[in-house]
Image (cartoon, rainbow, N blue to C red):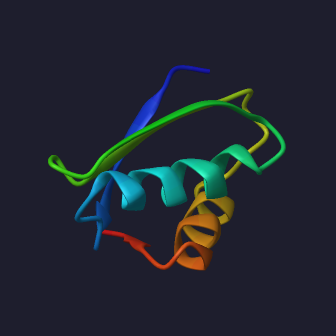
């Protein structure tokens, strides 16, 4: 599946990026993750078995939310 870039609110530093990346990497089916606090985005590539609701939930568990 091609990567999708999502807007994330609340990230303000590289530690925030790490938290979001770790939360998403823990989901089964996630192939790669790259967060960018400056742009306020996270790019997620999955094997097709991860829906946006699961991604949003993982981001929320890390203390952030999808915009």
Instruction: Tell me which residue sits at (77%, 50%) in the image.
Output: 27
Query: With 14 as the anchor, is 38 left or right in this view?
Result: left
User: Toward the viewer: 13 or 47?
Assistant: 13
Which residue shows up at 58% across the image and 56% down it? 52
**What residue is at 67 percent from the left and 52 percent from the top?**
51
Q: Is residue 1 left or right of residue 3?
A: right
Quarter residue 54 falls in: bottom right
Query: Residue placed farthest to the top in the image?
Result: 2
Q: Is residue 46 left or right of residue 16?
A: right
Where in the figure is residue 22, as x and y percent of width and height? 63, 51
- Residue at screen point 33% across, 51% down: 14
Q: Position of residue 65 (x, y in %)?
A: 41, 74
Q: Quadrant of residue 25?
A: top right
Quadrant of the image containing the N terminus: top right
Q: Nearer the viewer, residue 9 or 6?
A: 9
Q: Where does residue 35 sit, x and y in percent of width and height?
A: 38, 43
Instruction: Examine the rendered structure and indicate whether residue 49 appears above or below residue 18.
Output: above
Q: Nearer the viewer, residue 44 or 21?
A: 21
Observer-nearest of 49 and 23 = 23
């Amino acid at each position: 599946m091609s990567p999708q870039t999502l807007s994330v609110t609340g990230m303000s530093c590289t530690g925030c990026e790490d938290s979001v990346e770790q939360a998403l990497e823990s989901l089964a089916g996630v192939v790669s993750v790259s967060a960018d606090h400056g742009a306020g985005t996270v790019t997620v590539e999955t094997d097709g078995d991860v829906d946006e609701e699961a991604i949003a939930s993982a981001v929320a568990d890390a203390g952030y939310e999808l915009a």
